[in-house]
Amino acid sequence: MSEQATDDAATEGTGKRSSTPKMVLRIVISLVLIAAIFYYLLKDISLADVWAAITAMTWTELVILALVAGWNLVTYVFVWMTVTPGLSAGRAMIMTQATTAITNTVPAGSAIGVGMTYAMLGGWGFSRSRTTIAVLVSGVWNAFAKLAIPVLALALVALQGNASAGRITAAMLGIGGLIAAVVVFALMLRSEQMAERVGIVAGRFVSRLLAVIRRPPAQGWEIATVRFRNRTVDLLEHGWFPITAATLVSHLSLYLVLLVCLRDVGVSDAEVGWAEVLAVFAFARLATAIPITPGGAGVVEAVLITGLTAAGGDKPQVVAAVLVYRALTWALPILVGVFCLLWWRKQTLTAPATDGASATGTARP
């Protein structure tokens, strides 16, 4: 073995040894935080009442809930098919479920999930540049949806006559933030010069934040925004509407699962209206923008239970509904994703060495 190879191996081994304690620490902190959140949420209610609300669901309600949950599992497939032309529904299902399983269980799982996305799409014949476009566009549209749905929900609550000064203020702030985000994005796509300016301003802003925690300044943001702009324009020129529609369907399908769970365990529309449920759901989605725990475990439950109870829901029934909702939208995707991940690994290990582009019917750009 050469001296360079030996040095590389030593460096890699050191990196793995140093990263293992950090990963263990992250896991411990996440588990402690999740346990503390659930203890606080459940300490003053009867778990027997929660279980009674769950077991009181009829077979008809369970079948409807299963259908809605199954529909929710496949909706993000539509997003990836629209941002990655040529990707089949079956492969999109395998990829989205496998990466979701990682994201929902592993600290910093989002980054690992992105890496898996590159590996899967690369194995199926899609170039890194096309994968990068798909990752960025789906991420941007997902962020827009997380900003837009709370604004929509608060507006609907206001129209129903349940608007308070706080809700109106939150709606106005949300509208302002959404408009600002859309305007910045539109300006960035308008021209390379504008994209470069947006990158410079964003880089300066981030550098100031990094200086507070004594980290080196951000560099190359203007180059990154120009590249993103050039790669994205062609995709969005004809695909912006299906991408937007698929993203909204994905988010609203999650909301539908929550709404059905609430109604099935006995939380009526008179107690918590559908618009109020949408508002609480939307803010729970915003709470997961910063990945404090894997899949938002504990954080989502805290926001949903607190918000729905404050809106008028009976707490044991609300807790029951939220637990069923999270079982169907957090735990179930993990089980499906593990199966998809194992299937993909088996196919990867046994597949013959062929050109992935010809296998998928898509040409490498």
Image: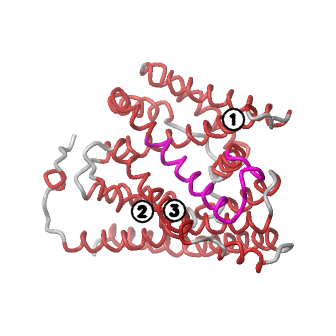
- Give the side of residue 65 with respect to residue 73, left or right: right
Question: What amino acid is at disc 1?
Answer: Leu
Q: Which of the two residues, 249 or 210, is positioned nearer the viewer here?
A: 249
Question: What amino acid is at disc 2?
Answer: Gln
Q: Locate residue 234, reporting x and y percent.
A: 32, 29
The crowd level at tag 2 (other Cα within 10 Å; few <14, some 14-19, many 20+) is: many
Rendered view: 103 above or below 269: below
Earlier in the chain: of badge 2 and badge 3, it is 3
Q: Kindly report which numbered mark, 1 or 2, lies closer to the viewer in this rendering.
A: 1
Which quarter of the rendering shows the C terminus?
top left
Residues under labels 2 and 3: Cα distance? 22 Å
Q: Locate residue 283, reporting x and y percent.
A: 69, 47
* Circle 2 SS class: helix
Earlier in the chain: of badge 1 and badge 2, it is 2
Earlier in the chain: of badge 3 and badge 1, it is 3
The residue positioned 58% from the left and 66% from the top of the image is 107
Q: Which of the two residues, 266 or 95, is positioned nearer the viewer here?
A: 266
Queried whether the magenta region covers residue 27, the answer comes back as: no
* Circle 3 SS class: helix
The crowd level at tag 3 (other Cα within 10 Å; few <14, some 14-19, many 20+) is: some
Residues under labels 1 and 2: Cα distance? 32 Å
| Residue at which label 1 appears | 156
Which quadrant of the figure has residue 218?
A: top right
Stretch of the chain drawn in magenta: 246-274
| Residue at which label 2 appears | 97
Queried whether the magenta region covers residue 268, the answer comes back as: yes
Contact flag, marks 2 and 3 (Cβ < 8 Å): no
| Residue at which label 3 appears | 64
- Give the side of residue 18 with respect to residue 126, left or right: right
Which quarter of the rendering shows the N terminus?
bottom left
Q: Locate residue 250, reporting x and y percent.
A: 49, 48
Contact flag, marks 3 and 1 (Cβ < 8 Å): no
